[in-house]
Each structure stands twice: as C-alpha cells, then as structure tokens.
Amino acid sequence: NRYIGYLISLATRSYDGMRVGLDCSNGSTFNIAKNVFDALGAKTFVVGNEPDGTNINMGCGSTHIENLQKLVKEKNLDCGFAFDGDADRCIAVDENGMEVHGDYILYVCGKYLKECGKLQNNTVVATVMSNMGLFKAMKRENIDICVTTVGDKYVNEAMVANGYVLGGEQSGHIIFSKHATTGDGILTALMLMEVIIEKKQLLNTLASEVSIYPQLLENVRVANKTAARNNEEVKKAVASVERELGEDGRILVRESGTEPVIRVMVEAKKDAICREMVQRVIEVMDKEGLILS
C-alpha cells in the first residue's frame, strides 16, 4: 500500500478521461498497476492479471506485446503499457497499436525533461544497442547521450557517477533516478503519462519524432569469442561495412557475456542492406574457420 501510495503521489495531473490498457504479464503488477491507474482517474483495461504460479511471462507482457496491441485497438484506447514478470520493464503501445519501446521512451521523456529544465547535465544514458534513430533524434534536440555497454547495471553506474536523471535500454528497462534506483515499469508508465497529459499530445505524435532504423542482429556460435572478435580479416570486413554505411548506418560486433557467441548487428536505411552487411561479416568468419559447425 505504501508503494501504491508513492506511485500515485508522483502523478502531476488526474488521468480522468484517459482510456488505458495494461498487460501485467501474470506477474508482480497484477494487483498493483490497475489500482494505481484507477486511483488516478483512468478508465483501465487489463490483461495478463491472472497469475497461477506458473504462467508468469508466458505469452504475455512486454515480451509478447501483441496482446496489448490487440487490446488497445479493440477497445479504442488512448495508450497501453506492458510490464514483464518482475515489473522492472515497460513497453508502451500508442493509440494506433504501434509498439513504443525503450528508445522511444528515452526520447519522449528526455525531451520533456529538458523542456522542463530537469534534464541534469543535458544528458540521457543509453547502451550501444540503442537504435541509431534515437542518437540522431537526440542530436537534433541538442541532448547529449552517454553510451554504456549492454545492461541496466551499467546504465545505472553511469547515472550514479555523473548525476544523470534518465537512462535505459531499448528493452524497456528505464531508470528515473529522481524517483527510483532501478528500473520500475509502473513508474515508467506514469512518467510517459505525465508527458502525454502535460503536452496534450497522444503517444503516436510524441514518438513519431524518432525515425527508428531497420536493425538486424545475428548470433554466431564460435569456438573462441576473443579470437573471432580480434581476427584481422573480420576486422577488415567490419571496417569495410563501416565505410560503406557511412552516416546512414552502423555495425556493432560484440561478444556475448554468457554464451560462445559473437553478436553481429547492423542498422541501415533498408532491411536488405542490413542483411547484406551482416552476411558479409559472417561469411568472413566462416571462411576463417571461426564458426562452430
């Protein structure tokens, strides 16, 4: 009850007249999220709020956003929010059913905080996996981005070290350090609702300022991650792709922290270009005998 009370106290306006969908992933928000939104005046519609001890995250929540998209469109809602089982993540859905993932959320909230004079050091923290579209949109708004390695642990470390107030990942782990020390899905939803209500704009309008680039990520199983990453021919292939993409894309090749895998990710203006560039690097790995058969 104290937690619910704290969340409610963060809202700047009533949600009266707002129609909101929630997907609680049969997890820890199942008896909390609706109470918060109802108390703030929203007309709330909920799915994924019937946990049985085994169905947490099963075909629902932020990793199965299609359920919330269907709910938002069928009920003609203003927006929706999907949490994962332990509720540290939030993925939103706009009034048209479009997914609004963490990169959009960082942009919408970062721009709003800057407009309010609350964006400490004019900086948002993101990871190397955030989309190039986010970096370009932030640059257009003259907002700096501190880039960390993948993991909300590293996002939080950068925020604590530099006093930043907003950071997160594309997956929906968003940290608002003024209000919490870790990702909190319901808190993230409330912060987005603040922008929607204060700016009197629907989520699609707010998020449409970010043009997300097509992205392709391939996981390549290798015998030795370090050897594959440092192979001279692989380095040459990666450099060649970087030159060819120029400012219209990027390539990221990194080692998995938990598997014998090299992750090859390319962003470009078209899906076909992403596929071509990723395949080019993988073919070199194969030719060099680095890939496990």
Image: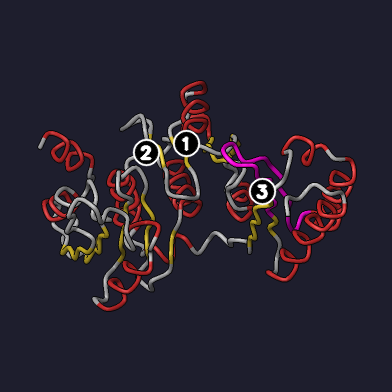
Magenta stretch holds residue 42: no
Compared to residue 161, the image places residue 123 above or below, namely below
Q: Nearer the viewer, mark 3 or mark 2?
A: 3
Q: CA distance from mark 3 to mark 2?
A: 25 Å
Circle 3 sits on which residue?
A: 263
Residues rendered magenta in the picture: 247-265
Circle 2 sits on which residue?
A: 183
Circle 1 sits on which residue?
A: 152
Q: Residue furthest front?
A: 293
Residue 178 coordinates in the image, percent (x, y):
35, 30
| For the residues bearing labels 1 and 3, Cβ distance under 8 angstroms | no
How busy is the neighbourhood of tag 1: few (under 14 within 10 Å), some, or many (20 plus)?
many
Q: Amino acid at mark 2?
A: Gly
| For the residues bearing labels 2 and 1, Cβ distance under 8 angstroms | yes
Residue 268 coordinates in the image, percent (x, y):
71, 61
How busy is the neighbourhood of tag 2: few (under 14 within 10 Å), some, or many (20 plus)?
many
